[in-house]
Image (tube, grey):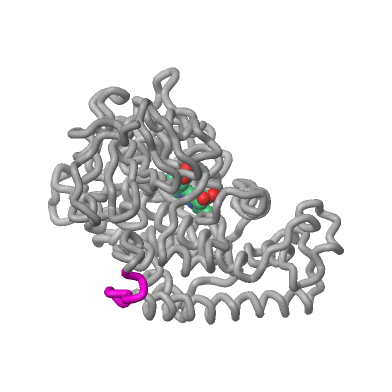
Amino acid sequence: RPYPPGPRGWPVIGNMLMMDQLTHRGLAKLASQYGGIFHLRMGIRHIVVVSSPDMARQVLEARDKVSNRPTSIALDYLSYGTANMAFADYSPFWRQMRKICVIKLFSRARAESWDSVRDELNEMLRVVASNAGQAVNIGELVFGFAERIIYRAAFGSRLSDGHDDFLKIMQEFSKLFGAFNICDFIPGLSWADPQGFKARLSKARGSLDAFIDSIIEQHISKRKGKNITGRDEGNNDMVDELLAFYADVGEAKADSDDLSSSIKLTRDNIKGIIMDIMFGGTETVAAAIEWAMSELLRNPEELKKTQEELANTVGLHRCVEEGDFEKLTYLKCVLKETLRLHPPLPFLSRATAEDLNVAGYYIPARSRLVINLWAMGRDRKCWNDPEAFKPSRFLNVGAPDYKMNNFEFLPFGTGRRSCPGMQLGLYTFEMGVAHLLHCFNWELPDGMKPTQVDMSDVFGLSAPKATRLTAVPSPRLKCPIY
Ligand code: HEM
């Protein structure tokens, strides 16, 4: 039973010298040489890279065998021993955690009820309006927007300047998640910790503990003071919702809600889920909005068409409202085309629970599966003129949607580990882009030509733009209210 094809490796280290090619672009290049499924060995770890929709279907159809996530020393330590949802193995307990997130935390109806989204949106629009005629750094603007929405939805308070510490902790976590640690591939070196990871990991987790523990304590006292049960009180934040399932609060049984009487979360679970929300919901949404604005500024005809649809559907006398989205067909195509070309998470990562046989190849248990969404969104066999930004391709009958069975278009993943925050993510993405386009006209700064917009990306936890997009806004609405 052969492994899938792949480059020859060295004894012991395997293909570790190719470490710098493990980006979405590097792996897409290797796929053009070795095909839609290929194999690398990094020290003791097998990595199988899937880059064609057909191979992705075959691999992911082995549901039970590919429902775990690969972990690393950093992921394991920073997620409190995989007490969170994103890295925990598939299990009955994981299914319950996911149910809480989908039903209680991430539904679209829930997001629409949050004042935080509307308030933070208005705040962003006011900042843009006050900078009319000057170059605005759209990348920083939308990153702050996404961060403030998620922070407020999670903790109930506004992310103000005093919370710089929290942002620094998140940045350090992000670096540690993505850092190359040789001990992950050659575990025999762990005792020596040659890159000095242990101290960094312990410092980072200590800082997050101090921050989140104090927030949890404040919420527990607030609940005791107000006698809050786990029921939806309208303005409960995510920590309130999670505390209804916290074994130590001792009130879950009093709640007749089936879910809260059957699931008990530990403090580590709560901290882990909060971490999932902060990481899952910030960079992804911000990167998606910045890419959409970049593609539109690089393609003025598409910008014009999208803004015309907004003007014809909504009118220039008011802002976009939730009820308008259903009619904004072209805007929806713009969002899909953006996610096809620039999936914020360029890979789906899975680990095999058992040996697998795919297309006649052997994939051993505990292999790391990397499904390259970025490469699949540009596959010439599935997409006509794949490098071009053409939202209208999604108007065609039978064009892929978000149903997760179109393997050439999986921006939110598929199956059991698909994104539980999709509704919330799409809502924030739609709201951000629609308002920026409807409330303002945008021009590139300093006479820059559309073809000069830099479209390169960087590879990390997500794949954001390498250089921030800047553009000059001017008001578009007749009587702006924000
Ligand atoms: C445009 C926005 C977003 C995109 C493109 C996106 C994309 C993804 C993708 C591709 C995955 C992996 C799916 C798989 O392996 O099959 C994922 C997982 C996840 N996402 Fe999202 N996401 C977005 C927004 C959000 C938001 C807003 C949240 C929460 C606030 C969130 C929370 C999560 C979590 C917790 C997981 C891990 C789920 C698990 O392992 O069970 N995401 N997301």
Q: Quadrant of the N terminus?
A: top left
Q: Residue drawn at (41%, 44%), measured in percent from left and top?
A: 348
Q: Taking 228 as reference, is 312 above or below it?
A: above
**Direction top: furthest residue:** 397
Residue 194 belongs to magenta span: yes
- Highlighted range, magenta: 189-196
**Where residue 413 sits in the image (x, y, percent)?**
46, 40
Residue 268 included in the magenta stretch of the image: no
Q: Position of residue 172 (x, y in %)?
A: 37, 72
Residue 14 in picture, x, y percent from top left? 23, 51
Residue under the image location 18 percent in, 34 percent down: 33
- Residue at image position (53%, 81%) is 210
Viewer-proximal residue, 455 or 419? 419
Position of 257 relative to 36 (above/below): below
The image quarter in which residue 4 lies = top left
**Residue 129 visible from this viewpoint:** no
Tally the numbered discs: 0
Using the image, determine if residue 344 lies above or below residue 341.
below
Residue 375 appears anywhere in the view: yes
Which SS does the magenta portion mostly show?
loop
* Most foreground residue, 78 or 296: 78
Q: Position of residue 63 (x, y in %)?
A: 53, 36
State the image quarter where residue 300 is shown.
top left
Q: Is residue 220 left or right of residue 69?
A: right
Q: Which residue does the image show at 46% across and 60% down from the upper left?
A: 279
Left or right: residue 194 compared with residue 29:
right
